[in-house]
Amino acid sequence: MMNMNRLIVFSRTFRIGQRLLGCHARHAGQEELRLQQRRSIKTHSRHLAYAKDLFLGQVNKAEVFPYPEIGNDELEEIKQFVAPVEKFFSDDVDSAKIDREATIPPETLQGLKDLGLFGIMIPEEYGGLGLSHTIYARLNEIIALDGSIAVTLAAHQAIGLKGILIAGNEAQKKKYLSKLASGEHIAAFCLTEPGSGSDAASIQTRATLSEDGKHYLINGSKFWISNGGMADIMTVFARTEVEVDGVKKDKISAFIVERAFGGITSGKPEDKLGIRGSNTCELSFDNVPVPVENVIGEIGGGFKIAMNILNSGRFSMGSSCAGMIKKLIELTSEYAATRKQFNKSLSEFGMIQEKFAMMALNAFVMESMAYLTAGMMDRPGIPDCSLEAAMVKVFSSEGGWICVSEALQVLGGLGYTKNYPFERFVRDCRILPIFEGTNEILRMYIALTGMQYAGKILTGKIKEMKKGNIGLAIGMVSKKLRTSLGASVDLGLTGKDGVVHPSLEDSAKKLEQNVSLFGSTVESLLYRYGKTIVDEQLVLKRVADVLIHMYAMTAVLSRASRSISIGLRNHDHEVLLANTFCNDAFFKNNYWMVQLQKHSPENNDANIKKIAKQVLENRAYICSHPLERTY
Amino acid sequence: MKGSRCLHQLKSLRLLSHAGRLLPPAAAGDNGALFRLHSSSQLGGLQCPQREVLRHFHSSPACTKSQPAGFVQEEDKTRDKSLVAHDDLFQQVTKEAKTKATFNKVIDVYIKRDIRRRGHVEFIYAALKKMPEFGVEKDLTVYNKLLDVFPKEVFVPRNFIQRMFNHYPRQQECGVQLLEQMENYGIMPNIETKVLLVQIFGEKAHPMRKYQRIMYWFPKFKHVNPFPIPEQLPEDPVDLARFSLTRMANDWDAKVTVYQLPCTDITESGAEVTLPHIVGIQSPSQMEALAKHNPCRPVFVEGPFPLWMRKTCVYYYVLRADPTPPEEKIEEPYDPERCFIYPLQLDLDLGRDLGDDESFDVEDLDEGPVFAMCMTSQGDQATLNQWISGLQQSNPILGQIPTLFRLGAGPHELQGVGDADSASRSWFSSHVHKEEAHPGEEAEAVVEEEPRRSQGVKQ
């Protein structure tokens, strides 16, 4: 409750700051604008917008450099927790069996409970381990080796009980968290409905206050609920009637529902492609009485809660995928080294080598992004890292999918059989781009959040430009001319006050160039589309992709710089990986940003839309078959 | 390619050759020269007198001017006579039966009767005119057979002067006319047609040009319709209604409902009552729109409107409403708590730049929504009321909305056209001669006739 309030207050002040900025920007040049911005944000405890600042073409280096470190006591904690979990997963978890039988055996579940994995982030006072985001991410690297267990645990603590943790009151926390932490009770998150994914307006489940005013009666059904069959405590979102300014309105509220309240029936578990051991089913609520004290937050405040839960649960996917890829590299490299063809081992073939390099790069980038984000979240205050977390999720889920499929490819036909675990990894991995917000919708979130932020600040300037302010226009043109003539962009990552190690200087320069170009691209997009950019999904997709790659570049630069500085083993390999990735990402970003220019030949958007329209109108592939008729 | 074409030519040649002599297989590999040689030798053997006579007319560049004139005069004289004869020929057969077989027989009789094929142009015109009557107007083999009536080789220009001027214009015109009739009926010529045309008129004559044009455009246009109508429309009126309604609705989700099947009942009083079929269509979005309709405003049942399906005309009725007045249109307010993940609207004071505003300034006329359509064989209010009450089962709001019937003159009023049709046909037959004299008009007349007759059929 308190946390929530703080969050709301915080965001409100922030919004006021933004509005202030907007007003000033109308009369001020860019220098003054930057000054204003710094001033207004200084009133808060910390800068919190690394990714958002990229939309303005600025690198907020204090936010991401140096790479976040953990304390020595935390290091001890990690050592203490990681080893037994690793041992448990290698000795006691039979992933093939879990996949085959589509259920996690009770003794495995008990083992997980004994290790405390059901309450990793629940504070110690409520019986949990009370660990930080960073250690949670670290443990997830190991847990992810079995997709079913990872999803079961994530549904339990990343979303299932998160509502109580971040918005529940003291009594609710006391009542529920200890049993949830021990794993005695398992939690589930009930938001999705047959007709509603991310659309709050189509939620049909309804909670009505009973006549005595002590209970809410919940009616409706929820769909695709992870842990739905075995959950004892559920966070249920339902429509409630709320009076706002004398008008009755339907708003979403969150409830803690115990299975023991009665009236809850769970359907048959879904037969899924992957993560088969996790339990997913439909839940029906038939007049389930929920006491009024089980409302999370205030009545009608469910929307914000759902959003915050979803936003906070995503960051760990980066480390999960990295853990999985690291395991895959071990498994496949052994095969590649021993298998001989034409008197050469597979590892000597360039195309096989490429796959391993790709896997290593991806694992390195995901890891860097995940721990950078986790480190940012662990900082004091209530950091809003939802944008960064979403970027980690999109990048790692897609990279993970490619890596898993390439790893299978190394083994060829063998990988396709059930004798090897690769096909299971492929199946399990396919869920990653789908759940916790599909990657498509997250890209919208990433791009639009930044656009909103940049738009607030740039509105004044753009309006001046549209009015025909000569001074601004000349400034713009000369700036563009300078960059096109090859003037280097200096955003302070290197040089005298630089934060990037000199061996990564080239890569840092590339990032700076990308950031600066991105800033002007965003400005021109805002100039062109204004608020109608919401409808330009293909544009937004590229904006999101560029941002994700710039964040990834930042993460690897930051991490590799730190590794060199403190002399971590094999840091030269890290430098190599970082430089390779930055080089690659630089070209991709440039390509996407060229596509974002209006009449660039690379921009195929109009054609793509036309093709899709014609196909969808006919609901079929409409070309006639080449063998259909003769002349 | 060339080999196969040659094979085709040979095949058709065999078809042509009355001797039916087999060609040596070696000829297949050869080209047109050989083929021409063969054909001419055959023709020479068979039609020697005729060929020589005709050669005499056109091949000699030194012939006097009076000679072609005399030929024309002679033609003029014989034309009427032969016309009567050709018509007679068809007329005689008509007494038996009008089928493809008899039509072919007439052609065979003509070919056998006169080795010189005198008056073949007139015969072909007469035959073209009679084709629809015999039901062979869409038969490619018949056209080819008809084309085969032309004597071969004789009209092929043999020097540049002949090629430059219109060589044998009447024959060429007749050939073009034949092709044009094929075109009007949508018949695509085949390789046999081409071989015949080359044999008759040569490579660069007008009929050949016509053929090439047809072959250029036909494949492009024949299948250009993205909503093709099948050659054979369903016979059953219910099936036909189902087909036409789905065609008009153009919505994949639209659902056809048969509210009543046609049946004949005998009432207690002994009178025979025929119940009309009622077939309706409605899509989910139409249902949604109807559910949102303001019950104070009436909906209208309007019709009948005609819909042509090839040669059949069907009539449909619509359930529609007047456009919603602007003051009643409510725009759904933006709810910031709508999407859990991303903002559906940006809170910005910036619009789209003019350069990126791709909307056209189109005068948008709101015609009002159409909620459902139906087809029935009997467009009276009672029948349509039955449709509305059927609709009401899935659209309960119809019970509260006043429904007005605005029915125009039904298809029955148009029955008079049937009489006009028969009248026109008699006019037509009485003008056959006249039209035969102007072959250019003929195809047009054929096309014109179609709708009239089909209207009669449909009733």
Image (cartoon, coloured by chain):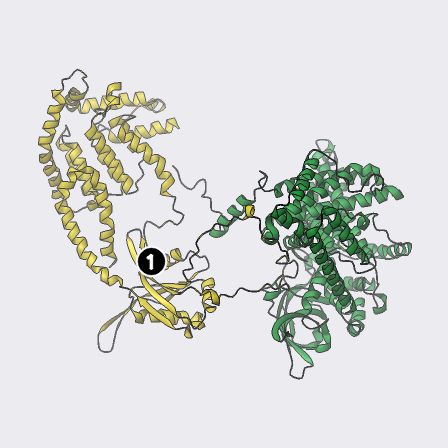
Question: What's the colour of chain B in the image?
Answer: yellow
**Subunit under mark 1:** B
Between A259 and A478, the residue placed more toward the observer is: A478
Q: Which residue is mark 1?
A: B240
**Dividing the picture into quarters, in which one does residue A15 lie?**
bottom right
Between A136 and A422, the residue placed more toward the observer is: A136
Q: The N terminus of chain A appears in which quarter of the rendering?
A: bottom right
- Image x and y of residue A573, in percent: 81, 39
**Dividing the picture into quarters, in which one does residue B184 lie?**
top left
For this view, does B8 lie left or right of residue A447? left
Say what amino acid the circle numbered 1 marks.
Leu
- Image x and y of residue A125, in percent: 85, 68
Q: Which chain is green?
A: A
Q: Residue drawn at (73%, 31%), measured in percent from left and top?
A: A343
Picture layout, residue A114 above or below residue B72: below
- Image x and y of residue A94, in percent: 75, 56
Give the residue at the far top of this rendering. B62
For this view, does A184 lie left or right of residue A620? right
Q: Secondary structure at mark 1?
A: helix
Few, some or many residues within 10 Å of mark 1 (<14, 14–19, 20+): some
For this view, does B228 lie left or right of residue B125? right
